[in-house]
Image (cartoon, grey):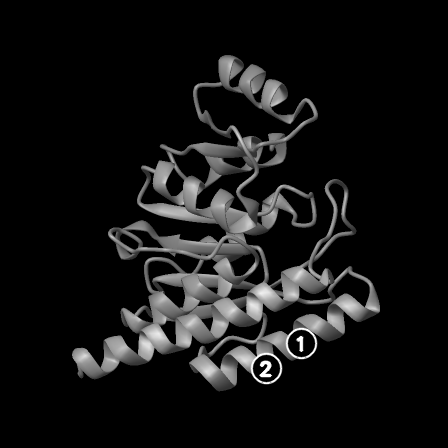
Amino acid sequence: MRGFLAELPHLAENYEVIVVDDGSVDKTGAIADRLASEDRHVKVVHHPKNRGYGGAVISGIRAATQPYVLLADGDGQFEPKEVEALAAFVPEYDVVAGKRIRRADPLMRRINGKAWTTLVRIVLGIPITDIDCGFKLFKRELLEGMELRANGAMISTELMARLAGRGAKIKEVGVHHLPRMAGEQSGANFKVIMRAFRELFALYGELKAERQKNPR
């Protein structure tokens, strides 16, 4: 978080760092609150109970007030200085999505991620090659009024699908990926995978119904 607080003043006069404490049982919430008391740019959202990755992303988006929203995972796998690489393509693009140049994850997780992205591109027609990269920059006005439902990792897919449906102009930019510094991975959990598949095909059905109801 301190890395983003150091980097953002170089890119914007007004900025905020929103920390979502997703029902953590360690000292994450207390540490975030202390930082917020020390720096007016830090805002903290607390979940009394864990809502999952998707719930945390949705809360962060809803709490955002600036013209652009940067989605950045809190596990230390992205370099704050690379925000500049994304910001270089606004306002020309509505969404600038990071694409991990060399993913610093175990082999099976990389294989699963590639397979999931391929499936999403086929099913939903989303034109990016690293759907789950947790480093994306959005024009906030395109997120207004958007109803997001995914509680887990499907949130990245849902976000991109709904933004593409709104005609967002999307750009992918290569970013470096660092070894995980905090948190635990749950993407290989069978229940997590099955939930993602259910949410994917539910989203496909919903978007298809919307297109039939409101053809362009």
Camera-nearest residue between 15 and 146: 146
Q: Amino acid at mark 2?
A: Thr
Give the residue furthest to the bottom.
122
Q: Is residue 141 above or below residue 154?
A: above
**Image point (31%, 45%), residue name:** 67
Residue 79 lies left or right of residue 6; in this view the side is right
Quickly name the residue at label 1.
114
**Image point (54%, 33%), residue name:** 49
**Image point (71%, 54%), residue name:** 186
Camera-nearest residue between 30 and 4: 30
**Image point (61%, 75%), residue name:** 116
Q: Is residue 162 above or below residue 146?
A: below
Measured from the top left, where is residue 115 in percent x and y?
Answer: 66, 79
Camera-nearest residue between 89 and 76: 76
Give the residue furthest to the right.
107
- The 10 Å Cα crowd at callout 1, few under 14, some 14 to 19, many 20 or more, is some
Measured from the top left, where is residue 216 in percent x and y?
Answer: 17, 83
Q: Which mark is residue 91?
A: none
Measured from the top left, where is residue 24 in percent x and y?
Answer: 63, 31
Q: CA distance from mark 1 to mark 2?
A: 6 Å
Q: Amino acid at mark 1?
A: Lys
> What SS does tag 2 mark?
helix
Measured from the top left, where is residue 127 in percent x and y?
Answer: 46, 79
Quickly name the residue at label 2.
118
